[in-house]
Amino acid sequence: VFLPPDPFVVNIADEETERYLQLGITLQLDDAKTGDQIKAYMPMIRNNILLLVAHKHAADLQTAEGKEKLARQIQRETLRPMGIEVDDDEDEDDEDAPKKKKKKKKKRVVTDYPVLAVHFSSFIIQ
């Protein structure tokens, strides 16, 4: 099951010049029920992704590794509103990642995520 949210256009954090990223993604999901859940949380998910991308620098996003890391971070931010924490230790020290807010609500930690992958359909930095 694939779910393509509306494209994102966001200013990125380059200090030397004003740049923005136009980002189109498609979420690969485990089933249609997950698609319905994602749609219900879409305002929160879009907010999380916009805040994530706004802290990125163009140089970090131009490499294949940077894009792969962004895809994992988008997966994490997509699952977070549904109460699922992605166990992604490598992003813990990422200074560009938005700061996590402490919440009283207990999060589920799972290894088989309902969002299987994040695929880029467009990726334009200007």
Image (tube, helix red, strand yellow):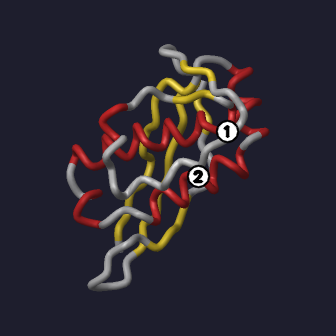
| Three-letter amino acid code of the residue under disc 2 | Asn
Image quadrant where residue 1 sits: top right
Q: Residue at x 29, y 57 (%)?
A: 61
Q: Position of residue 73 (x, y in %)?
A: 43, 42
Q: Residue at x 56, y 57 (%)?
A: 7
Where is the C terminus found, in terms of image quarters? bottom left
Q: Residue at x 63, y 56 (%)?
A: 47
**Viewer-closest of 108 and 39:** 108
* Other residues around mark 1 within 10 Å, as few (<14) / some (14–19) / many (≥20): some
Q: Is residue 111 left or right of residue 69?
A: right
Q: Is residue 112 left or right of residue 90?
A: right
Image position of 104 with respect to 55: above or below: above
Q: Which residue is mark 2?
A: 48
**Viewer-closest of 12 and 110:** 110
Image quadrant where residue 36 sits: top right
Q: Position of residue 112 (x, y in %)?
A: 51, 14
Q: CA distance from mark 1 to mark 2?
A: 9 Å
| Three-letter amino acid code of the residue under disc 1 | Pro
The answer to whether the residues at label 1 and label 2 have Cβ atoms under 8 Å apart is yes
Q: Secondary structure at mark 2?
A: helix
Q: How many marks?
A: 2
Q: Position of residue 54 (x, y in %)?
A: 46, 65
Q: Secondary structure at mark 1?
A: helix
Image position of 4 with respect to 63: above or below: above
Q: Which residue is mark 1?
A: 81
Q: Position of residue 81 (x, y in %)?
A: 67, 39
- The disc placed on residue 118 is none
Image quadrant where residue 96 sits: bottom left
